[in-house]
Amino acid sequence: MKIVAVLYPGGEIARKTPELLGCAENALGLTDFLKSQGHEFVVLTDKEAELDKQLPTTDILITTPFWPAYDTKERISKAPKLKLALTAGVGSDHIDLEAAAARNIIMAEITGSNVVSVAEQVVMHILALVRNYIPAYNRFPKENGILQKLRQKHMIWKIKLWEYLEWEGLDNVYAKD
């Protein structure tokens, strides 16, 4: 059985981080397993021409919602052997569901796979709102040199603190950073 996965290019970071499964370099962690079962496993980053070359002999197509290979009616018609189209994530906006249903192609997604990342995103948004992050961020570039002025004041404060500690004889109690 021929399985084709269209995944995003992860580059050097992907080679150093095998836990980054969704990229082409780490291929969802499936390469060894599928090959040990006798399947042909082709991993692509090209969502267009290279995928179109593979479609006539593809049995299973794996895509992701964040690097979508658009499975249009035309593309589905070029894949006569296609039995399963799997979204490695959630969502099916990139698949022509009517064309797939007309051909009895099973459409599947990994429901709930994004629960943790959605929760993290919500917490990040809450923190950004509660801490006024966006207005504060937008102010800094407009106010000429404010960050440098704050750093200078911080250094002056540190110097004055050390002078005081030395005068009081406490400078040996605290480590300088």
Image: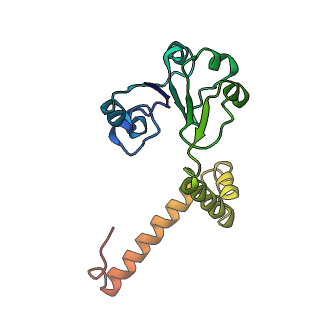
Q: Which residue lies furthest to the bottom in this view?
A: 168
Residue 21 versus residue 78 in the image, above or below: below
Residue located 64% across and 16% down the image: 77
Q: How is the image coloured?
A: rainbow
Q: In this view, does 104 lie to the left or right of 159?
A: right
**Percent from the top left, x then y, of residue 24?**
43, 31
Q: Is residue 101 left or right of residue 7?
A: right
The quarter of the picture where residue 70 lies is: top right
**Percent from the top left, x then y, of residue 162?**
37, 75
Observer-nearest residue: 39 or 118?
Answer: 39
Q: Where the N terminus falls, by quadrant?
A: top left
Observer-nearest residue: 16 or 24?
Answer: 24
**Percent from the top left, x then y, of residue 66?**
58, 37
Q: Is residue 2 left or right of residue 90?
A: left
**Percent from the top left, x then y, of residue 94?**
66, 31
Tally the numbered discs.
Answer: 0
Residue located 43% across and 41% down the image: 21
Residue located 67% across and 16% down the image: 74
The quarter of the picture where residue 40 lies is: top left
Residue located 55% across and 61% down the image: 150
The quarter of the picture where residue 15 lies is: top left
Q: Where the C terminus falls, by quadrant?
A: bottom left
Observer-nearest residue: 28 or 98?
Answer: 98
Q: Which residue lies furthest to the right in this view?
A: 98
Q: Residue furthest left?
A: 172
